[in-house]
Image: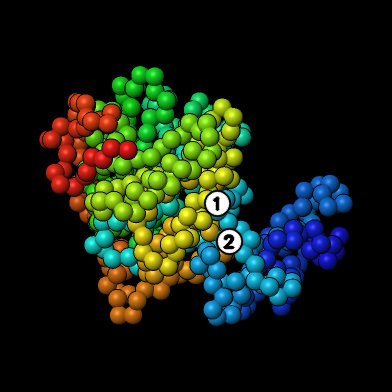
């Protein structure tokens, strides 16, 4: 099979670049990605399995086109990256501008978008992209909610993770309903902190929830506390008040969803729209739109979480995402170019275009510079002139503070009734003046 024959099999919507031909990969060489100078086109060579592409040989190298960014100025696209040149010379964005994406890797990356935001900015003032059931990669069409792994989500700009755990033989394992997702909470914490060590200007919010407890396991809260203390490496924010970005750079911010323990920002105290049981896609989108507008014009000291995800008897997470994500993208695009606080926007199967709109709504400093998909050479973000050394010092010191006092001992709080069916903690268990209880 010739290179021309392989090129003919590439889908027409992939961005190609005529000016930079395929680089030669010597026979028997290791499959290393190769980039062309002056252009972001990247080819990676993978071993061809037997019986594929009309050949029974094994060991043949198949080229895979990752992405191509044009070096021309002024050709910026929806994902904050440079335009890709098609064979006809037209700029096409394909997956880079998509609201929905169900392939294993994101079309563009934005790993450092928080780094340029002011330290004094509270997290409740930000627009933050997130994923629902972030580790739900297995279980078939009815249960699968994401196609990107944890590292790919973080590299794409996701900064809110929805983690569902079950206590199994003394270990907190990740589940979606009754399906084990082949991960543990300790592993998720370690992998997230590994990303934060590489990008110390970022912060990751993590909602930790016990998945489907008929009766809450008595040892769940104690095991969660132990896991955060040991695997968190002193880089976990477990206080009840909403922090500023400067306080939590390089850290994981826990949003707990426990009935009787306080191990972070009380999740039930936030303004949340999570109509997960979808009977009508139109009604689901209407509720999402209303809560987005509520976040845009609401109290800036309140954290707003809008779940665009859902499931139902006659639908599945992918179908809901295919319907809601493009409408969410269109709704956000109407106010593109101006700073808007959308709150935490949580989706299934997000696309790079939707993530870019959420990030860019924080203002020009948060627009970020999109790079190629994971596996390509990452272009480091450049700090403003005259502030590089100062900011680097702040970020590095925020990784793991010397005094590991961020994790308080768990406190028992008796739930009492509150208007609107919300749980309300006693005054002694809340930081006054920080969190606002709002009816959803």
Q: Quadrant of residue 367?
A: bottom left
Give the vertical position of 118 relative to 187 (above or below).
Answer: below
Give coordinates of residue 160: x percent, y percent: 40, 48
Q: Nearer the viewer, mark 1 or mark 2?
A: 1
Give the vertical position of 37 relative to 424 (above or below).
Answer: below
Residue 186: image tag: none
Q: Residue at x 38, y 45 (%)?
A: 291
Q: Residue at x 74, y 58 (%)?
A: 11
Identify the image quadrant of the C terminus.
Answer: top left
Please tell me which residue lies in front, 205 or 394: 205
Residue 96: image tag: 2
Check disc 1: other Cα within 10 Å, few if <14, some if 14-19, many if 20+. some
Determine if residue 134 is in view.
Answer: no
Q: Residue at x 26, y 54 (%)?
A: 300
Q: Earlier in the sequence, mark 1 or mark 2?
A: 2
Look at the numbered discs 1 and 2 and tell me whether their residues touch, using CB distance below 8 Å: no
Residue extending farthest top? 215
Check disc 2: other Cα within 10 Å, few if <14, some if 14-19, many if 20+. many
Q: How many marks?
A: 2
Please tell me which residue lies in front, 312 or 229: 312
Q: Quadrant of residue 306?
A: top left
Give coordinates of residue 21: x percent, y percent: 74, 74
């Amino acid at each position: 099979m010739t290179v021309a024959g392989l090129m003919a099999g590439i889908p027409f919507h992939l961005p190609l670049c005529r000016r930079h031909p395929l680089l030669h990969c010597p026979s028997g060489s290791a499959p290393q990605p190769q980039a062309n100078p002056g252009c972001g086109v990247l080819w990676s060579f993978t071993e061809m399995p037997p019986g594929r592409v009309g050949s029974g040989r094994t060991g043949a190298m198949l080229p895979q086109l990752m992405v191509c960014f044009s070096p021309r100025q002024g050709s910026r696209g929806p994902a904050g990256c440079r335009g890709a040149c098609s064979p006809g010379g037209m700029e096409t964005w394909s997956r880079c501008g998509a609201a929905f994406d169900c392939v294993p890797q994101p079309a563009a990356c934005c790993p450092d978008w928080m780094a340029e935001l002011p330290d004094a900015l509270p997290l409740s003032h930000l627009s933050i992209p997130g994923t629902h059931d972030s580790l739900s990669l297995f279980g078939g069409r009815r249960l699968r909610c994401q196609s990107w792994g944890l590292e790919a989500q973080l590299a794409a700009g996701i900064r809110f993770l929805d983690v569902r755990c079950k206590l199994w033989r003394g270990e907190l394992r990740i589940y979606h309903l009754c399906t084990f997702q082949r991960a543990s909470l300790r592993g998720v914490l370690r992998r997230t902190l590994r990303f934060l060590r590489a990008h110390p200007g970022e912060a990751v919010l993590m909602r930790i929830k016990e998945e489907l407890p008929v009766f809450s396991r008595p040892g769940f809260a104690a095991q969660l506390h132990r896991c955060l203390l040991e695997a968190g490496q002193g880089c976990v924010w477990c206080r009840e008040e909403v922090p500023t970005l400067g306080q939590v750079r390089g850290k994981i911010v826990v949003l707990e969803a426990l009935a009787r323990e306080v191990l972070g920002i009380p999740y039930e105290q936030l303004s949340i729209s999570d109509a997960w049981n979808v009977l009508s896609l139109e009604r689901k989108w209407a509720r999402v739109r209303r809560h987005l507008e509520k976040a845009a014009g609401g109290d800036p000291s309140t954290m707003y979480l809008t779940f665009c995800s859902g499931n139902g008897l006659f639908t599945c997470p992918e179908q809901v995402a295919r319907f809601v994500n493009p409408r969410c993208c269109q709704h956000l695009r109407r106010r593109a170019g101006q700073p808007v606080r959308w709150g935490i926007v949580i989706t299934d199967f997000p696309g790079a275009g939707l993530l870019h709109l959420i990030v860019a709504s924080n203002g020009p400093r948060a627009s970020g510079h999109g790079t190629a998909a994971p596996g390509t050479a990452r272009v480091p973000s450049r700090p403003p002139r005259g502030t590089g050394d100062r900011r680097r010092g702040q970020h590095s010191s925020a990784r793991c503070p010397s005094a590991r006092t961020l994790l308080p001992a768990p406190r028992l709080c008796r739930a009492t009734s509150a208007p609107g069916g919300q749980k309300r903690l006693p005054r002694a268990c809340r930081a006054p003046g920080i969190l606002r209880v709002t009816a959803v």
